[in-house]
């Protein structure tokens, strides 16, 4: 009888240790996923649309598709922002503006989590590039 209890205690200890290690690994993995990895192909991608080209169109596309979450000024304070747990970002910050145009194009195109994929909503690449150009004006 005593041997069975000792074996059960060892099993419980081992399972507890495995559980703690698994939880720690899971927590680390979840924290790692917060960073939005951009493929190298997009990091180096150049914007084919000159910055001032069709600025009014870029702004109107932003106001139509992005303002509800990211806000009129891009501070992440749009009317729908309260519905999300995630930080919607502040497009006026140096950190945001330091991203390459290709990275912004990639993020706008593919989306993730609550951010929708805009390739379907805006199938024309030029429209997404115009939004990238407009995002640059939010630093000013």
Image (tube, rainbow, N blue to C red):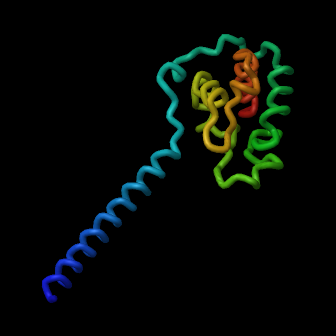
Q: Residue at x 86, y 26 (%)?
A: 60
> Residue 128's quadrant in the figure?
top right
> Residue 85's quadrant in the figure?
bottom right
Nearer-the-camera pick, 6 or 40: 6
Q: Would residue 66 be visible to someone looking at this image?
A: yes
Nearer-the-camera pick, 18 or 92: 18
Q: Residue at x 65, y 49 (%)?
A: 87
Location of residue 11 in the rendering, given as x and y in whole percent from the top left corner: 23, 73
Q: Is residue 2 above or below residue 30?
A: below
Q: Is residue 100 above or below residue 48?
A: below
Q: Residue at x 29, y 69 (%)?
A: 15
Q: Residue furthest bottom?
A: 1
In the rendered image, which quarter contains the C terminus?
top right
Q: Is 35 displayed left or right of 122 in the figure?
A: left
Nearer-the-camera pick, 3 or 60: 3
Q: Would residue 51 be visible to someone looking at this image?
A: no
Location of residue 14 in the rendering, given as x and y in whole percent from the top left corner: 24, 69
Q: Residue at x 67, y 39 (%)?
A: 115
């Amino acid at each position: 009888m005593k041997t069975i209890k000792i074996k059960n205690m060892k099993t419980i200890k081992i399972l507890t240790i495995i559980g703690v290690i698994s939880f720690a690994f899971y927590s680390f993995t979840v924290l790692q996923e917060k960073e939005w990895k951009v493929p190298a192909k997009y990091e180096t991608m150049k914007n084919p649309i000159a910055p001032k080209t069709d600025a009014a169109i870029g702004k109107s596309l932003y106001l139509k598709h992005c303002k509800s979450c990211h806000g009129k000024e891009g501070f992440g304070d749009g009317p729908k922002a309260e519905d999300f747990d995630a930080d919607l970002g502040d497009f006026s910050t140096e950190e945001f503006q330091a991203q390459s145009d290709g990275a912004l194009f990639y993020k706008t195109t593919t989306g993730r989590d609550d951010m929708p994929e805009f390739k379907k909503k805006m199938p024309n690449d030029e429209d997404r590039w115009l939004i990238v150009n407009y995002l640059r004006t939010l630093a000013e």
